[in-house]
Image: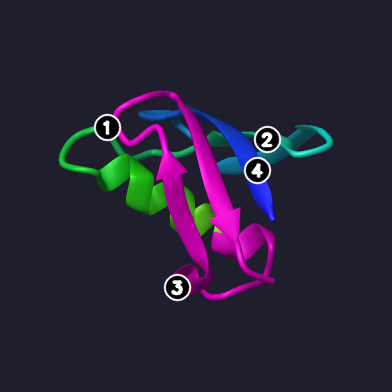
Amino acid sequence: MKIAVKVKAGSSREKVERIDGANYAVWVRAKPTDGKANEAVIKALSKHFDTAKSNITLVTGHASKQKIFSIAI
């Protein structure tokens, strides 16, 4: 399944919130430097969907706040 994610990096809290259908908002503490925020989002999504991090792939938006992830559940 593919989901659209709006990332809020550098937040004081970590949270995953479903907006509607396949749209999510994810807050992570990591700064958007050297892909650290992307890694933190993958970790948060793996906890939220109760799946391994290896099952989550960043499809588009490597340097953007709007990202598309593919999740193999």
Q: Is residue 54 placed above or below 60 in the rendered structure? A: below
Secondary structure under tag 1 reads loop
- Looking at the image, is mark 2 or mark 3 earlier in the sequence? 2
Q: Position of residue 41 (x, y in %)?
A: 46, 47
Chain-order first, disc 2 or disc 4: 4
| Mark 3 Cα-neighbour bin, 10 Å: few <14, some 14–19, many ≥20 | few
Please tell me which of labels 1 and 4 falls first in the chain.
4
Marks 2 and 4: CB-CB under 8 Å? yes
Q: Please report whichever mark, 4 or 3, sits nearer to the chain's N-terminal start.
A: 4
Q: Position of residue 15 (x, y in %)?
A: 60, 42
The image quarter containing residue 37 is top left
Secondary structure under tag 2 reads strand
Report whether 17 appears left or right of 32: right
**In the rendered image, the vertical position of residue 19 relative to residue 18, given as above or below:** above
| Residue at x 37%, y 24% (from the top left corner) | 64
Q: Is residue 72 magenta?
A: yes
Residue annotated with mark 4 = 3
Q: Which residues are magenta?
A: 46-73
- The three-letter amino acid code for the residue at tag 3 is Ser
User: Which disc, if any, is residue 24?
Assistant: 2
x and y, in percent, of residue 36 in the image: 26, 46
Q: Residues within 10 Å of mark 4 (few under 14, many from 20)?
A: some
User: Could you say whether the residue bearing mark 4 is in a helix, strand or loop?
Assistant: strand
Furthest-left residue in view?
A: 34
Which residue, given by chain and number where applicable, does mark 3 sit on?
54
Mark sitting earlier along the chain (2/1): 2
Q: Are marks 4 and 3 in contact (CB under 8 Å)?
A: no
Residue on which the image places disc 1? 32
In the visual, does 60 lie left or right of 22? left
Q: Amino acid at mark 1?
A: Pro
Judge depth for marks 2 and 4 and give the one in front.
Answer: 4
Is 2 placed left or right of 11 in the picture? right
